[in-house]
Image (tube, rainbow, N blue to C red):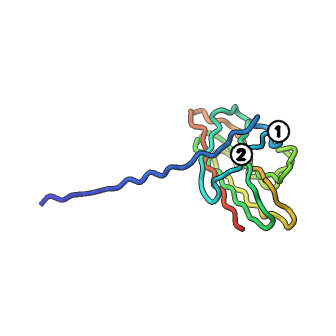
């Protein structure tokens, strides 16, 4: 007796994070980083065009009472990417972080922040490359969840 076996392959297509900003090192230099459109989902970012020590910035609008959770999973095993969250009008990305994660190696980084009453606006997410991958793969997955 001959049998027929059928199988289905499902390919998950993850959208790219829009990480194009003017100079990779200033959140206030016009134009602002684009609004992140992948909320409650995953997008893939890339540091391939950035030398070691450079950043990717994303902008996300938050309201008073919102709780944002940002999770970043680096793909390269030999890279070290860190994660920060900044309030609106942050001036110095090295001093003005309101939440940050700087775990060693290629660990998954995560930050959570609740926006205080009377606050709100365009907050900034920073993915910082402290150690560049030795391979051609310089990507990371960014998951952003906002509870309103």
The N terminus lies in which quarter of the figure?
bottom left
Q: Earlier in the sequence, mark 2 or mark 1?
A: 1
Q: Identify which residue is drawn at 72% across, 57% down.
A: 111
Image mark for residue 29: 1
Q: Nearer the viewer, residue 53 or 103?
A: 53
Callout 1 secondary element = loop
Dot 2 falls on a residue whose secondary structure is loop
Which percent across, then down, holds residue 134? 60, 32
| Mark 1 Cα-neighbour bin, 10 Å: few <14, some 14–19, many ≥20 | few
Residue 68 on image: x %, y %: 72, 61
Identify the residue under disc 2.
34
Relative image position of residue 130 (x, y in whole percent): 72, 39
Give me the residue at 59% from left, 46% from top: 44
The answer to whether residue 46 is left or right of residue 128 is left
- For the residues marked 2 and 1, what is the alpha-carbon distance in whole angstroms? 12 Å
**Residue 30's spot in the image, x, y percent?**
81, 39
């Amino acid at each position: 007796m001959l049998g027929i076996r059928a199988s289905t392959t499902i390919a998950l297509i993850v959208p790219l994070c829009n990480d194009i900003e003017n100079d990779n090192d200033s959140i206030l230099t016009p134009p602002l980083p684009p609004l992140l459109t992948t909320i409650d989902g995953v997008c893939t970012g890339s540091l391939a065009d950035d030398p070691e020590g450079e950043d990717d910035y994303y902008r996300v609008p938050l309201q008073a009472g919102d709780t944002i959770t940002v999770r970043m999973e680096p793909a390269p095993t030999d890279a070290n990417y860190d994660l920060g969250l900044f309030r609106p009008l942050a001036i110095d990305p090295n001093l003005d972080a309101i939440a940050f994660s700087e775990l060693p190696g290629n660990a998954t980084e995560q930050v959570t922040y609740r926006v205080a009453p009377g606050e709100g606006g365009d907050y900034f997410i920073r993915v910082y490359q402290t150690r560049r991958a030795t391979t051609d793969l310089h990507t990371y997955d960014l998951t952003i969840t906002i509870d309103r």
